[in-house]
Amino acid sequence: MLSNLEYARLKLSKNTEATKKSRLGQYLTPNGIAQFMAEQFQPSIFKHYRLLDPGAGIGSLSCAFLERKTLNNDHFESIEVEAYELDDSLHDNLSKSLSQYSKIPNYSFRITETDFIDSAVNDLLKGAGAYTHAILNPPYKKINSNSDYRLLLRKVGIETVNLYSAFLALTIKLMAPHGQIVAIIPRSFCNGPYYKPFRSLLLDRVAIKHIHLFESRKKAFKDDDVLQENIIIHLERAGQQGDVIISTSSDDTFDDLSSSSYSFHKIVIPDDQEKYIHIPTSNKVDSVGSSPRINHTLDDLGIMVSTGPVVDFRVKDQLISFPEPGTVPLLYPGHFSFQHTEWPKLGFKKPNSISQNSETEPFLFPTGYYCIVRRFSSKEEKRRVVASVVEPLAFQQYKMLGFENHLNVFHTKKHGLPENIARGLSIFLNSTIVDEHFRRFSGHTQINATDLKRMKYPTKEDLIRLGEWAKEHDFTLTQSGIDEQVEGLL
């Protein structure tokens, strides 16, 4: 049965326009992932199963659940499936898929063609719900702050910025105590300020039982060219939080599946007001988090870090391709190569300069030494954290600099840092132990200023020593040399 579904999914995926997939946030679940998700459900205390499948597509997830439960000979007395699907072009396939299980005793299903968010909010306001199981691959699409969805969700106390987190938040609220949820969702909710209300709801209402991470973000939905980094998460409504299983695989074949158990306080650090959800993928000691020599905050050091304030598309009319009178340098990640700066850059696709005037001056920094960290990388890149030094000698004819929004900037009250501090910070941030720290506990391909603020750093004296060493080895810096110097702090 599931092989027929996979054939139908591949055919639909091939024949569905990319614009429609993007508009609906619709990516049908591959068979291997559906089966793995169904396997996550543990024996249930319920005898009458009510399965919720919001955004059911062609029924891959519900069918995988039904196959699993019948093969396991679960001692249930009835199964009722509630499948939501807004796309009427999928209803025939969905109905055929769910009809195949009519031989299961006391089995029934209903396809609900209305919008899940609208329907779920109404159910919650009426006190309905009480599902025993939920399996979902929700749509991925941003929700505008003034949209009807945001207003609807606020009626039931949900504040979130994407359809996937809205679907999961509503599902959590619709579950009976000890009901189980298995979802495949983007990992982006794990940190960052925009998802904090959603993380709070999740951590208040459910126990996290298992998180599965795909090592390549291109593989989970490779037929649809989805580059989002996805996880599979197993939750229990009002469950007792214990250790969490973290598993990984390269792709949806799960051929190289490996798993470990972690204490919950390693997943959500106690007293973390941001409620970041870390997904460790190694049992190795986190040197950055455990060394007594690396225990200072940026506040302790008198250093600040900010996202580059120049958002280029908002000041298009102020951008200049190449320097001319009345302009100052505008720095992008592409201007930096390890410890050195190439500016202006010939053949650069981005503007090299920005006009200096009353409109742009609030976004500019005085020329000086700064440490910058690139905000974005791809998951397959060797390094997640890439730091460089801004050297004023490269811009000695300019009094001000612009930093574009794809950079994080270390500074002191919007002024430059002492040279050795800037160089020492760059050496520390480019070390393997810092990169492993981010990969293990953040995992995101995006390095936000908030992430850098939360991290611990060496003493000011140690940063100065690293900076002095960096100056002496300016043109002979190697990764092994950097790692040897930073590990010497431990």
Image (cartoon, rainbow, N blue to C red):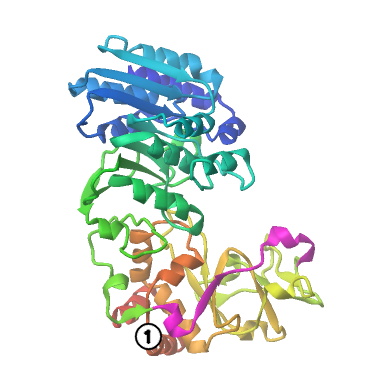
Amino acid type at image mark 1: Thr
Dividing the picture into quadrants, the one containing residue 481 is bottom left
Name above or below for residue 159 compared with residue 106. Answer: below
Residue at 47%, 68% (x, y): give it.
386
Question: Left or right of 466: which side holds 49?
Answer: left
Quadrant for the C terminus, please.
Answer: bottom left
Name above or below for residue 342 compared with residue 113. Answer: below
Residue at 47%, 45% (x, y): give it.
228
x and y, in percent, of residue 1 in the image:
33, 16
Residue at 22%, 18% (x, y): give it.
77
Whether residue 215 can be seen here = no
Please give the residue where the numbered disc 1 appears in the rendered image.
459
Q: Residues within 10 Å of mark 1 (few under 14, many from 20)?
A: some
- Asked whether 193 falls inside the magenta stretch, the response is no
Question: Left or right of 257: which side holds 350?
Answer: right
x and y, in percent, of residue 14 in the image:
52, 26
Name above or below for residue 318 compared with residue 99. Answer: below
Dividing the picture into quadrants, the one containing residue 206 is top left
Residue situated furthest front in the rendering: 126
x and y, in percent, of residue 155 in the image:
53, 41
Name above or below for residue 117 compared with residue 320. Answer: above
x and y, in percent, of residue 480 in the image:
34, 74
Question: Left or right of 461: which side holds 304?
Answer: right
Whether residue 292 can be seen here = yes
Q: Regarding mark 1 in the picture, which secondary structure is present there?
A: loop
Question: Left or right of 411: which side holds 329?
Answer: right
Q: Nearer the viewer, residue 346 or 69?
A: 69
Boundaries of the magenta span: 297-319
- Asked whether 299 falls inside the magenta stretch, the response is yes
